[in-house]
């Protein structure tokens, strides 16, 4: 099992904090935001961490080097900023046939349960697990994705940034995948508004092909830092 951490984005929507650096390197609680994901990856027991970098890649590479908490670290360059699924595709060769757990370099979680998620993935034999959390305010789900699932947590439908969330479960960027998820990247549709391929649509292609995908309650609180408001929210519940 490897960890794939996506940290290539420019962060145009948070210019007031990231005009001079990759947004994943914004300081939060005394460390770069990215380091929270690296720490969770290492604590989950992965064999290797693969980081996709792009904008101001040298800052990330020079900061973290080739090892983090005794885990080897490799870097992949995303030369064009063409979205999350494209970033995953860039890392396919470096992932080298392994199953992997996905992290976003700009997300923060309170009480994350990645090790438990990996244990369930290995024991259950599913194709993928999607990290989710219950939120009282369903409006927050409009920032990420919603889903339809049954009582056994099997997911049947994912919707990116829904206008009308289907329930109070909010999707996150933390997911565990069989390596074969890369097979669905080529057939993933381009989002009509964002003009790039989105993670929920990639997973939906696997679901439509009959693969078993389940949800896993990954944390108690969550922030994906895309705006100054997101950053302020994350400051309010930092857990180191």
Image (cartoon, grey):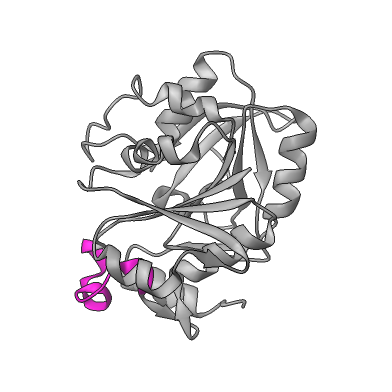
Is 108 situated above or below 213? below
Left/right placement of residue 93 relative to residue 228 reads right
Q: Eyeballing the image, is 14 above or below 76?
A: below
In the rendered image, residue 33, in percent from the top left (x then y), is placed at 45, 71
The residue depicted at 19 percent of the width and 74 percent of the height is 19
User: Relative to 57, is 167 above or below?
Assistant: above
- For image coordinates 36% across by 35% down, the residue present is 89
Left or right of 48: which side holds 194?
left
Residue under the image location 53 percent in, 65 percent down: 67
- Specify whether 28 is left or right of 67: left
Q: Position of residue 190 (x, y in %)?
A: 26, 29
Query: In which quarter of the view is residue 221 placed?
Result: bottom right
Specify the quadrant that holds the C terminus: bottom right
**Could you tell me if residue 220 is visible in this image?**
no
What percent of the width, then of the height, locates residue 215?
65, 38
Relative depth, front residue between 137 and 2: 2
Q: Residue furthest top?
A: 209
- The magenta region covers 12-25
Q: Nearer the viewer, residue 109 or 232?
A: 109
Q: Magenta span: helix, strand or loop, mainly?
A: helix
Residue at the farthest bottom position = 30
Position in image of residue 189 (x %, y %)? 31, 24
């Amino acid at each position: 099992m490897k960890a794939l951490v996506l940290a290539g984005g420019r962060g145009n929507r948070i210019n007031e904090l990231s005009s001079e650096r990759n947004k994943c390197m914004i300081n939060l609680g005394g460390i770069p935001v990215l380091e929270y994901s690296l720490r969770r990856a290492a604590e989950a027991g992965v064999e290797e961490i693969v980081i996709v970098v792009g904008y101001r890649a040298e800052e990330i590479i020079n900061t973290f080097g080739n090892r983090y908490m005794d885990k080897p670290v490799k870097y992949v360059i995303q030369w064009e900023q063409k979205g999350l699924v494209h970033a995953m595709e860039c890392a396919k060769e470096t992932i080298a046939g392994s199953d992997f757990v996905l992290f976003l370099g700009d997300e923060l979680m309170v009480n994350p349960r990645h090790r438990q998620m990996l244990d369930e993935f290995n024991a259950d034999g599913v194709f993928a697990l999607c990290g989710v959390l219950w939120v009282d305010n369903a409006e927050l789900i409009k920032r990420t994705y919603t889903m339809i699932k049954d009582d056994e947590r099997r997911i049947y439908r994912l919707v990116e940034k829904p206008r009308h969330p289907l329930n109070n479960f909010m999707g996150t960027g933390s997911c565990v995948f069989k390596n074969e998820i890369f097979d669905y990247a080529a057939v993933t549709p381009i989002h009509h508004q964002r003009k790039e391929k989105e993670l929920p649509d990639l997973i939906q292609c696997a679901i439509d092909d009959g693969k078993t995908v389940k949800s896993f309650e990954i944390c108690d609180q969550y922030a994906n830092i895309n705006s100054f408001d997101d950053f302020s929210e994350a400051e309010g519940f930092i857990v180191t």
